[in-house]
Amino acid sequence: MMVIGQRFYRPGEAEKKDGGFWQSNNTRELFYSFHKDEFPAESVMHRFVVHFIPPKMQIPPRTEQPGFIVQKMYLTKRKLLFKLKDAGANKEEEIDLLVQKTKSRLGNLPNIQPKDAVAH
Protein backbone atom coordinates (compact mmCIF):
# COMPACT_ATOMS: atom_id res chain seq x y z
CA MET A 1 0.00 0.00 0.00
CA MET A 2 1.27 3.47 -0.90
CA VAL A 3 0.47 6.70 0.96
CA ILE A 4 0.96 10.36 0.09
CA GLY A 5 2.73 12.51 2.64
CA GLN A 6 3.62 16.16 3.02
CA ARG A 7 7.36 16.85 3.02
CA PHE A 8 8.97 18.73 5.91
CA TYR A 9 12.66 19.57 5.96
CA ARG A 10 15.08 19.98 8.82
CA PRO A 11 17.15 23.13 8.25
CA GLY A 12 20.37 21.14 7.80
CA GLU A 13 18.74 19.08 5.02
CA ALA A 14 17.35 22.02 3.02
CA GLU A 15 19.77 23.27 0.37
CA LYS A 16 20.34 26.96 -0.29
CA LYS A 17 20.13 28.23 -3.86
CA ASP A 18 23.79 29.30 -3.87
CA GLY A 19 25.11 26.25 -2.00
CA GLY A 20 25.25 25.03 1.54
CA PHE A 21 22.34 24.38 3.86
CA TRP A 22 20.05 26.51 6.00
CA GLN A 23 20.84 26.79 9.70
CA SER A 24 18.66 27.01 12.80
CA ASN A 25 19.17 27.70 16.48
CA ASN A 26 16.08 25.67 17.40
CA THR A 27 16.24 21.86 17.28
CA ARG A 28 12.44 21.77 16.99
CA GLU A 29 12.35 23.77 13.76
CA LEU A 30 11.11 22.23 10.52
CA PHE A 31 10.53 23.93 7.19
CA TYR A 32 7.15 23.33 5.52
CA SER A 33 7.10 22.60 1.82
CA PHE A 34 4.30 22.23 -0.67
CA HIS A 35 6.06 19.10 -1.95
CA LYS A 36 4.20 15.82 -1.48
CA ASP A 37 5.63 12.34 -2.01
CA GLU A 38 4.16 8.90 -2.46
CA PHE A 39 5.89 6.19 -0.44
CA PRO A 40 5.22 2.74 1.06
CA ALA A 41 2.96 2.85 4.13
CA GLU A 42 5.33 0.58 6.09
CA SER A 43 8.02 3.27 5.91
CA VAL A 44 5.89 5.53 8.16
CA MET A 45 7.40 5.25 11.64
CA HIS A 46 4.93 7.34 13.66
CA ARG A 47 2.85 10.51 13.71
CA PHE A 48 4.24 13.71 15.13
CA VAL A 49 2.85 17.09 16.13
CA VAL A 50 3.72 20.18 14.11
CA HIS A 51 2.83 23.68 15.32
CA PHE A 52 2.54 26.40 12.65
CA ILE A 53 3.49 29.59 14.49
CA PRO A 54 3.80 32.97 12.75
CA PRO A 55 7.26 34.55 13.21
CA LYS A 56 6.05 37.33 15.55
CA MET A 57 4.41 34.90 18.00
CA GLN A 58 6.14 33.32 20.99
CA ILE A 59 7.01 29.64 20.68
CA PRO A 60 5.62 27.66 23.62
CA PRO A 61 8.17 25.75 25.73
CA ARG A 62 8.73 22.14 24.72
CA THR A 63 7.72 21.01 28.23
CA GLU A 64 4.26 22.54 27.76
CA GLN A 65 3.74 21.84 24.05
CA PRO A 66 6.04 19.16 22.65
CA GLY A 67 6.32 18.87 18.91
CA PHE A 68 7.99 20.53 15.99
CA ILE A 69 7.72 24.22 15.06
CA VAL A 70 7.18 25.61 11.56
CA GLN A 71 7.73 29.32 10.94
CA LYS A 72 9.17 29.13 7.42
CA MET A 73 8.33 27.53 4.09
CA TYR A 74 10.94 25.93 1.86
CA LEU A 75 10.46 26.02 -1.90
CA THR A 76 12.25 22.86 -2.99
CA LYS A 77 12.69 23.61 -6.71
CA ARG A 78 13.93 27.17 -6.17
CA LYS A 79 15.76 26.32 -2.89
CA LEU A 80 14.38 29.44 -1.23
CA LEU A 81 13.01 30.07 2.26
CA PHE A 82 10.06 32.33 3.17
CA LYS A 83 8.34 33.27 6.42
CA LEU A 84 4.83 31.82 6.83
CA LYS A 85 3.24 35.24 6.38
CA ASP A 86 4.89 35.56 2.94
CA ALA A 87 3.14 32.52 1.43
CA GLY A 88 1.74 34.39 -1.54
CA ALA A 89 -1.85 34.56 -2.69
CA ASN A 90 -2.00 31.06 -4.18
CA LYS A 91 -0.85 29.36 -0.93
CA GLU A 92 -2.09 31.84 1.67
CA GLU A 93 -5.33 29.96 2.37
CA GLU A 94 -3.48 26.67 3.02
CA ILE A 95 -1.03 28.34 5.43
CA ASP A 96 -3.82 30.27 7.21
CA LEU A 97 -5.69 27.00 7.79
CA LEU A 98 -2.59 25.36 9.32
CA VAL A 99 -1.97 28.38 11.58
CA GLN A 100 -5.64 28.35 12.68
CA LYS A 101 -5.44 24.63 13.53
CA THR A 102 -2.39 25.38 15.69
CA LYS A 103 -4.19 28.25 17.44
CA SER A 104 -7.19 26.00 18.15
CA ARG A 105 -4.86 23.49 19.86
CA LEU A 106 -2.63 25.97 21.71
CA GLY A 107 -4.89 28.98 22.19
CA ASN A 108 -3.76 32.49 21.36
CA LEU A 109 -0.01 32.82 21.63
CA PRO A 110 1.46 36.11 22.84
CA ASN A 111 3.43 38.31 20.46
CA ILE A 112 7.18 38.46 20.84
CA GLN A 113 8.10 41.60 22.72
CA PRO A 114 10.93 43.66 21.22
CA LYS A 115 14.03 43.47 23.39
CA ASP A 116 14.43 47.22 23.31
CA ALA A 117 10.83 48.00 24.30
CA VAL A 118 10.64 50.51 27.11
CA ALA A 119 8.04 49.97 29.85
CA HIS A 120 6.02 53.08 30.71
Image (cartoon, rainbow, N blue to C red):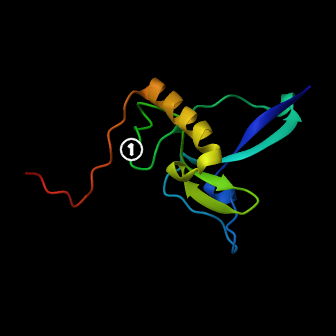
Residue furthest left in the image? 120
Q: Is residue 31 visible?
A: no
Q: Where residue 53 sits: x, y (%)?
A: 47, 41
Image quadrant assignment for residue 57: top left
Q: Residue at x 44, y 50 (%)?
A: 55
Relative height, residue 14 to residue 42 (above, below): below
Mark 1 surroundings within 10 Å by alpha-carbon count, few (fewer than 14), some (14 through 19), many (20 or more)? some
- Three-letter amino acid code at disc 1? Met
Residue 49 x/y as whole percent = 58, 31
Q: Is residue 33 visible?
A: yes
Position of residue 71 measured from the top left corner of the image (x, y, whole percent): 52, 48
Rendered-image quadrant of the N terminus:
top right
Q: Residue furthest bottom?
A: 18
Observer-nearest of 55 and 85: 85
Percent x, y of residue 70: 55, 44
Label 1: which secondary element: loop
Q: Is residue 118 left or right of residue 1?
A: left
> How many callouts does the rendering have?
1
Residue at horizontal 61 percent and vertical 63 percent from the top: 22
Q: Residue furthest front?
A: 89
Q: Is residue 91 above or below residue 99?
A: below
- In this view, the residue in front, 112 or 61, is 112
Q: Which residue is mark 1?
A: 57
Residue at the image point whose x is 59% and y is 51% from the top: 88
Residue beneath the point at 69% across and 70% down:
17
Is residue 41 rendered to the left or right of residue 120?
right
Q: Does residue 23 appear left or right of residue 19 in this picture?
A: left
Q: Foreground residue, 25 or 35? A: 35
